Image (cartoon, helix red, strand yellow):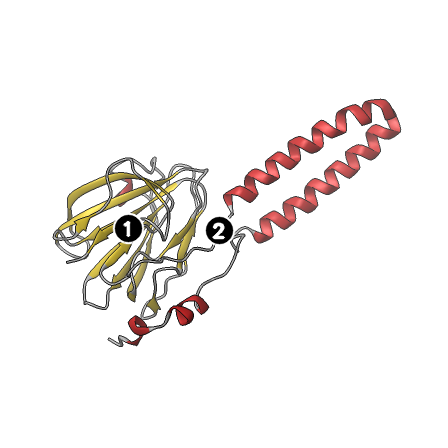
Amino acid sequence: MHRNYFKLTMGERIKKLKKIRIHREGTSELLYSAVAIFAICAGLWYVLYAVNPLVCHIVMPFVCVIFATAWLMVLNFYRCPIRYFNGDTERTVVAPADGKVVVIEETEENDYFHDRRQMISIFMSPLNVHANWFPVDGRVKFVKHFNGNYHKAWLPKASEENEHADIMIETPEGVDILVRQIAGAMARRIVTYAKADEDCYIDQHLGFIKLGSRVDVFLPLNSKVCVTMEQPTTGDQTVLAKLK
C-alpha cells in the first residue's frame, strides 16, 4: 500500500475537500422546487386578484409563508457545513455523521472479519446534517451495496436486514475499519462516494443518506472508545475511538 497520503500537509488536505455549503445531492431539488413554488404562487396570486383583490392581499401572504417554510426545511436538510478536524488524525476514529450514539457493543461480525468487533452506531434524525465523512485516514479496500428492508434505523436488525452500503478502509497502520451506511424507515436513498483502491481522509465526504438513518463503525476490540450512549455527535469533529 502507498502511504504517502498520510504525509500530506494541512494545505494539501484542504484542497481535497468537497467545499460545499449546500450538498450537491440537493441542489437540483432545491432549484426545481423554488421554481415550482414561484410559479404556483404567481398563478394563485393572478387568479385570486382577478376574483377579489382584497382576499388576494389577505390570503397570499399566508400561502407564501407556508411555501417558504417548507422550502427552508428542505434547505436545512441539505445543509452541508465545511468542517476541518483540528486534532491528530493518527490512530483516531472520528464520527462519520451528525446524530447521537445509539449502540456501543461487542458484536460478532461474520461477513468480513469473522470475529468479534466493537460496534458504534450513530442515528441521524431528519433534523441532522445528512452528509457522511470518512472516520479515518487510509485507503478504501472495497465498497459493497446491499438491497434490503426499511426497518426503523435504531433497531438492532437494521444493521444487517436494511438496505446498506459497506465500506472497508485500511488505515496507514494496517488496521481494517468497516463503515456501514444504513437506510431507515424514511431514508430510501444511500449515496456513497467512496471508491475501491482510492485514498481517503478525515475531512472528506464518504457519502450522503437522505432523511433519518444510521451509520455503524466496526472497530477492533482493543480500541479505546471515547463516546458514551446517547451522546450527540458532530460528523468529522467528535472522536469516537482511538486505535491501539
Report if residue 77 is visible in the image.
yes
Question: What amino acid type should be assigned to the residue bearing mark 2?
Answer: Cys
Residue 118 in the image: above or below residue 50: below
- Residue in front for this viewpoint, 165 or 73: 73
Viewed as shown, does residue 187 lie left or right of 143? right
Location of residue 199 by image quarter: bottom left
The residue labelled by disc 1 is: 239
Q: Single out the mark in the foreground, 1 or 2.
A: 1
Rendering coords of residue 143 (x, y %) = 32, 61
Location of residue 139 by image quarter: bottom left
Q: Residues within 10 Å of mark 2 (few under 14, many from 20)?
A: some
1 and 2 marks in contact (CB < 8 Å):
no
Rendering coords of residue 219 (x, y %) = 19, 53
Tell me what residue is drawn at x 32 percent, y 67 percent.
196
Location of residue 86 by image quarter: bottom left
Q: Under tag 1, what secondary structure?
A: strand
Q: Quadrant of the C terminus?
A: bottom left
Q: Calculate the distance from the C-alpha at mark 1 to the C-alpha at mark 2.
A: 19 Å
Q: Which mark is residue 63?
A: none
Tell me what residue is drawn at x 59 percent, y 53 percent.
28
Question: What amino acid type should be assigned to the residue bearing mark 1?
Answer: Val
Tell me what residue is drawn at x 43 percent, y 66 percent.
14
Query: In the rendered structure, which disc, 1 or 2, sits on the residue that comes first in sequence?
Result: 2
The residue labelled by disc 2 is: 80
Tell me what residue is drawn at x 15 percent, y 54 percent.
220
Viewed as shown, does residue 63 lie left or right of 188? right
Q: Under tag 2, what secondary structure?
A: loop
